[in-house]
Amino acid sequence: NAGVMQNPRHLVRRRGQEARLRCSPMKGHSHVYWYRQLPEEGLKFMVYLQKENIIDESGMPKERFSAEFPKEGPSILRIQQVVRGDSAAYFCASSPGQGSEKLFFGSGTQLSVL
Amino acid sequence: GESVGLHLPTLSVQEGDNSIINCAYSNSASDYFIWYKQESGKGPQFIIDIRSNMDKRQGQRVTVLLNKTVKHLSLQIAATQPGDSAVYFCAENMRGGSARQLTFGSGTQLTVLP
């Protein structure tokens, strides 16, 4: 499967715990994007990363949220001290390079905060 | 602020009929538009795109129309099938921006009736 891979598909956390969401881009893609989707809403941009670099994090909440895309391994979206309002579907997308406007999305991680 | 919006949140059509999903945008700097299809529990799937130097583009059973005068985008699906039932999002990319500037609308739920 050469698509964008996200795991886990479903993640349940209690308030105050940490959530780690993983994303492996499509083969040959070096650019990763994270989007958040609330029920019955569109996708909201969070962050754009290349290997070892955060290019644009203008959509990330100022606190508790962080993202990385290391030289080796998947991109990680980390949410510390989760609150109920963090419950959402988090989608990762990849593209082969900057200026490649077409994004390819993974199946998402559904985060539920109890 | 400038945003992408959809005229109708839901659309029901009979199987075999044609579907038209509309989208209004207000960002005059946008020059690239994409339609995505999202089935329940899945990530958005690319359907078709169009640049602002075109007013029509056709794919397999789908046609996208762009009216820059009134800032309107539509997706036409011919001979709608049950598998077309999904939420459809339009997204816009501002001129000069990379994929990180992809802005999504809130979506239209298409239901195909037997």
Image (cartoon, coloured by chain):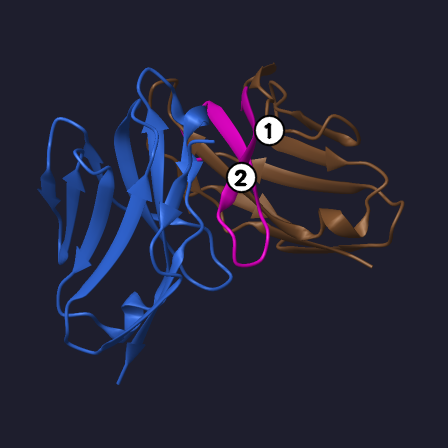
Chain colours: A brown, B blue
Instruction: Give how far apart the Cα atoms at labels 2 and 1 are.
Output: 8 Å
Do residues under tags 2 and 1 come within 8 Å of each other at their CB atoms?
A: yes
Residue furthest out toward the bottom: B114
Write down the chain letter for disc 1. Answer: A
Q: Is residue A88 magenta?
A: no
Front residue of A26/A86: it is A86
Instruction: Tell how many labels.
Output: 2
Residue that mark 1 sits on: A59
Residue A47 counted in the magenta span: yes
- Earlier in the chain: of badge 2 and badge 1, it is 2
Q: Amino acid at mark 2?
A: Lys
| Residue B46 locus on image (x, y percent) | 32, 46
Residue A54 in percent (x, y) is at 60, 17
Dividing the picture into quadrants, the one containing residue A101 is top left
Q: Provide the secondary structure element on which disc 2 rests.
A: strand
Q: Which residue is the extreme one toward the right?
A: A16
Q: Is residue A29 visible?
A: no
Left or right: residue A27 compared with residue B75: right
Residue at 50% over, 51% down: A107
**Residue A59 located left or right of residue B89:** right
What is the magenta range? A26-49
Tag 2 residue? A44
What amino acid type should be assigned to the residue bearing mark 1? Gly
Badge 1: residue crowd in 10 Å (few <14, some 14–19, many ≥20): some
Q: Residue at x 21, y 50 (%)?
A: B74
Q: Tell me: A9 left or right of B74.
A: right
Circle 2 Cα neighbour tier, 10 Å, few/some/many (<14 / 14–19 / ≥20): many
Of the 4 image quadrants, the one containing the C terminus of chain A is: bottom right
The residue depicted at 45 percent of the width and 50 percent of the height is: B106
